[in-house]
């Protein structure tokens, strides 16, 4: 788990905390209530000073909780304790310091993010959108109030993020690496390694028998987080659509007439043509094209044979066509019958040869002719309006203390209940997924602070809705030892066998370094062990593993030729002994297209390094001081201490 957090903080997702600070702040709103006051030094303390600015403890704490919440989408068992043990809090503080330092430096050098630019960023934050998908001033104010943050502070943070992007992106953009290092790097990608991997499992050295009750309890207490069960929630819900609207008043004659007048453009007859045309540079060239048509060639084929092209115009009216050609050309084209060729005629761009493919206009409609579609549209709008009003009444009922059961009874809806769900949509204890109809509201369900707090949400905007609440919240907690006793006993025995397995692995490693065959060294231990895995693999095969590279293989490709190393297996499972026998370098032609990809990769890495160096230089110029006392207070508060 610690490794998971380390990877998260170093990954592209983690790095967006530096250059994507706005998104995290928006998501942090729902968590802010839990960190509105840290108490003691952390409540009003400054965890760091960056030039003329400071970073307070509340900002660091709320972002730490939000980072853990985001991590839980990938690993539902993640906890704040694991985040802190993975050095996540210190790394998060460093990233907040980076943003603040760049903002101060940018301000000193005349870089600003104006109000309109900040407004454009606010429009992108999902938390601030209403049910229609557009920015909602009410949602914006409510989110700020819930977070205990004033608008000026939030806008300042958004502006800081924008300035950070202005500074960082140019520093990293377009970085290139010379050819010579690229040839070496590309050769490295195509090398082949031969080696051996032996596994010495702890189970082979674990003692027989059962541990004492005290020994088992002590081990469980020291490793409670290993047996953490994720938070799960049960969602109760019901769907409804416009079928709940029993009657909608029929549109009046005045409404029909008003709509016909408002949409008059849709019902007015139009004259338009479908054309294929070629514009030749001279009249002579245009006449040659006409001659080709007389010989049976198509307009397109004739144009291509002369380095020109025929343009297809699916629909255009006379006024627009006149703007593109000339009055005489437009008159001739719109006077011609479908299937005839017009030209050559002089236009603003050259000499036109035009084939009239057909009539693309539409006939007009009288009020009586359009009545049916207008009535249908008004009926649909009326139903949507009635549904919106109906939904507003439901929300008012919830706001006034109404329960989901009462609403469902009034609507004649049948409530359904989900199985216990994880925040990522999985059903707890199985490979099944949450019912599809509640997928849109699952995140909201996990943001609710308590049980039986009904909510309403749109499923298909303006057409269908869902009412839901959470009937059961089981917080993340270690599994009771009585339920997992067998697993805890097995893990304790593996821990006991781990020390002996390590000693045996060190014995095998020492023998292999002296030239003894690894399989023979294993046999000398006198225990039934898995056979040695002989490996011959090109480095390029690692890329085909899709990021799921076994740790011993990764070690094999990081070692020097002739070396032997020891590696522990996860969770006391044993130890690997890895040896590299030969390394065959790859060869690559400077013209190989693979080299271009390698240069792009190295350029990206170099760009990130340039950006990091710039951040370091800015912080050195601005001046940064951390307050370790306040930082420790934040850690204690997040871990539940005083």
Image: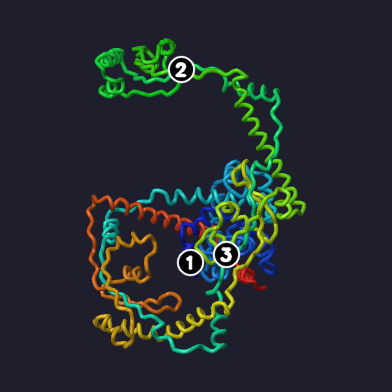
**Residue 48, visible in the rendered structure:** no
Q: Are marks 2 and 3 in contact (CB under 8 Å)?
A: no
Location of mark 1 (residue): 4
Location of mark 2 (residue): 323
Describe residue 435's horizontal placement relative to residue 275 as left or right: right
Q: Distance between the residues labelled 2 and 3?
A: 67 Å
Describe residue 528's horizontal placement relative to residue 256 as left or right: left
Mark 1 or mark 2: whose residue is earlier in sequence: 1
Q: Distance between the residues labelled 1 and 2?
A: 63 Å
Describe residue 191's horizontal placement relative to residue 451 as left or right: left
Percent x, y of residue 106: 54, 50
Q: What element carries label 3?
A: strand
* Residue drawn at (23%, 52%) of the image: 590
Residue nearest the viewer, comparing 447 with 418: 418
What number is the disc on residue 625?
A: 3
Percent x, y of residue 261: 64, 21
Residue nearest the viewer, comparing 165 with 553: 553
Mark 3 or mark 1: whose residue is earlier in sequence: 1
Q: Distance between the residues labelled 3 and 1?
A: 29 Å
Discs 2/3, front: 2
Q: In this view, does 90 lie above or below 321?
A: below
Residue nearest the viewer, comparing 152 with 417: 417
């Amino acid at each position: 788990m610690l490794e998971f957090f380390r990877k998260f903080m170093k990954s592209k997702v983690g790095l967006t905390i530096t250059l994507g600070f706005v998104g995290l702040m928006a998501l942090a709103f729902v968590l802010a209530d839990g960190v509105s006051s840290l108490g003691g030094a952390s409540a009003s303390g400054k965890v760091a000073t960056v030039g003329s600015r400071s970073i307070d403890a509340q900002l660091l704490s709320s972002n730490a909780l939000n980072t853990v919440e985001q991590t839980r989408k990938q690993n539902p068992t993640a906890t704040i304790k694991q985040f802190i043990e993975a050095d996540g809090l210190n790394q998060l503080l460093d990233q907040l310091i980076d943003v603040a330092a760049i903002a101060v430096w940018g301000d000193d050098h005349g870089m600003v993010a104006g109000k309109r630019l900040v407004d454009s960023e606010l429009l992108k934050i999902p938390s601030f959108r209403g049910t229609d998908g557009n920015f909602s001033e009410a949602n914006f104010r409510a989110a700020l109030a819930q977070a205990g943050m004033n608008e000026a502070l939030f806008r300042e943070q958004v502006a800081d993020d924008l300035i950070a992007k202005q500074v960082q992106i140019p520093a990293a953009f377009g970085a290139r690496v010379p050819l010579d290092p690229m040839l070496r790097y590309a050769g490295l990608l195509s090398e082949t390694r031969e080696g051996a991997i032996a596994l010495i499992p702890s189970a082979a050295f674990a003692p027989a028998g059962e541990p004492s009750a005290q020994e088992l309890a002590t081990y469980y207490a020291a490793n409670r987080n290993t047996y953490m069960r994720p938070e799960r929630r049960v969602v109760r819900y019901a769907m409804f659509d416009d079928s709940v609207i029993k009657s909608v008043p029929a549109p009046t004659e005045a409404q029909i007439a008003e709509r016909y007048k408002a949409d008059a453009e849709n019902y007015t007859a139009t004259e338009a043509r479908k054309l294929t045309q070629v514009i030749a540079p001279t009249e002579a060239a245009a006449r040659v094209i006409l001659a080709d048509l007389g010989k049976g060639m198509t307009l397109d084929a004739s144009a291509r044979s002369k380095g020109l092209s025929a343009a297809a115009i699916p629909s255009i009216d006379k006024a627009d066509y006149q703007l593109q050609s000339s009055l005489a050309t437009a008159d001739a084209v719109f006077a011609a019958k479908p299937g005839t060729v017009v030209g050559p005629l002089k236009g603003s761009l050259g000499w036109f040869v035009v084939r009239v493919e057909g009539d693309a206009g539409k006939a007009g409609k009288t009020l009586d002719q359009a009545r049916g579609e207008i009535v249908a549209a008004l009926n649909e709008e009326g139903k949507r309006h009635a549904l919106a009003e109906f939904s507003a009444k439901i929300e008012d009922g919830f706001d006034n203390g109404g329960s989901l059961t009462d609403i469902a009874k009034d609507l004649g809806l049948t409530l359904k209940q989900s199985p216990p769900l994880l925040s990522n949509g999985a059903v707890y204890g199985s490979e099944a997924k949450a019912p599809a109809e509640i997928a849109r509201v699952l995140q909201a369900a996990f943001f609710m602070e308590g049980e039986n707090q009904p909510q309403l949400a749109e499923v298909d905007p303006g057409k269908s809705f869902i009412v839901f609440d959470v009937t059961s919240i089981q917080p993340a907690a270690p599994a009771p030892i009585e339920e997992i006793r067998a697993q805890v006993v097995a893990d304790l025995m593996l821990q006991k066998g781990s020390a002996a397995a390590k000693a045996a692995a060190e014995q095998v490693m020492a023998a292999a370094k002296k030239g003894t065959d690894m399989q023979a060294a294993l046999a000398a231990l006198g225990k039934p062990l898995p056979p040695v895995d002989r490996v011959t693999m090109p480095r390029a095969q690692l890329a085909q593993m899709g990021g799921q590279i076994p740790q011993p293989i990764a070690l094999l490709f990081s070692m020097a030729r002739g070396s032997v190393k020891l590696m522990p297996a996860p969770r006391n499972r044993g130890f690997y002994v890895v040896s590299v026998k030969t390394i065959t370098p790859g060869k690559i032609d400077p013209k190989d297209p693979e080299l271009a990809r390698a240069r792009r990769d190295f350029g990206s890495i170099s760009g990130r390094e340039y950006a990091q160096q710039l951040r370091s230089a800015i912080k050195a110029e601005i001046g940064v001081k951390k307050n370790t006392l306040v930082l420790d207070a934040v850690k204690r508060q997040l871990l539940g201490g005083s």
